[in-house]
């Protein structure tokens, strides 16, 4: 099933880009190990849950589980888009931006993302979404759409 593969690909991409140094694509070397652990501990289980729900929906022929998986995938995608695009476009940082790391989003971004590959133009001194996260957002949104397409066929 394409939707399940996309969700799992997205989780794998997230894990690799969070834990493996691929500079200048990402800047894992600048992230504290505690920040990496926190990000993985919070996000990986949440990002994996739609795959579990979709698989169970398919195994039990319950389309409702597919729709729940799609809704959860949509919430995850919207959360990621808001995290990155609100500071860039509106200068507003969402409350969950730093996940309890004790630093501001601007400081975290300057230390870990500002020197990575970025393709969007500057807007003043606002943090810009980098290519790593543009790809992640595209994967999340594609997985969301595929999950909603797959749900009625479970």
Image (cartoon, rainbow, N blue to C red):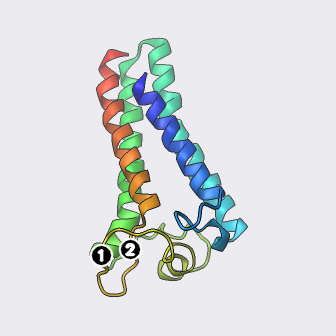
Residue lying at 37% horizontally and 87% vertically, measured from the top left: 125
Q: Quadrant of the N terminus?
A: top left
Residue 3: image x %, image y %? 40, 29
Residue positioned most to the bottom: 124
Q: Disc 2 designates what residue?
A: 128
How far, Cα to Cα, is label 1 from label 2? 8 Å
Which callout, 1 or 2, points to the residue nearer the camera? 1
Going 38% across and 73% down the picture, which residue do you hit? 128
**Residue 69, percent from left and from top:** 42, 33
126 vs 7, left or right, is left
SS label for mark 2: loop
Q: Going from the N terminus, do you reach mark 1 or mark 2 first?
A: 1
Residue 82 quadrant: bottom left
Q: Which mark is residue 143?
A: none
Badge 2 density bin: few <14, some 14–19, many ≥20, Cα 10 Å: many
Q: Which residue is mark 1?
A: 121
């Amino acid at each position: 099933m394409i939707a399940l593969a996309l969700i799992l690909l997205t989780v794998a991409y997230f894990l690799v880009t969070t834990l493996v140094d691929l500079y200048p694509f990402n800047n894992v070397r600048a992230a504290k190990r505690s920040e990496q652990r926190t990000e993985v501990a919070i996000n990986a289980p949440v990002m994996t849950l739609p795959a579990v729900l979709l698989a169970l929906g398919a195994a039990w022929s319950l389309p409702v589980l597919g729709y729940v998986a799609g809704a959860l995938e949509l919430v995850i995608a919207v959360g990621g888009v808001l995290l990155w695009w609100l500071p860039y476009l509106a200068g507003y940082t969402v409350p969950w931006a730093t996940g309890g790391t004790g630093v501001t989003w601007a400081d975290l971004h300057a230390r870990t993302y500002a020197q990575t590959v970025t393709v969007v133009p500057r807007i003043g001194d606002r943090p810009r979404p980098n290519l790593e996260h543009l790809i992640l957002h595209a994967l999340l949104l594609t997985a969301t759409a595929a999950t909603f397409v797959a749900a009625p066929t479970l």
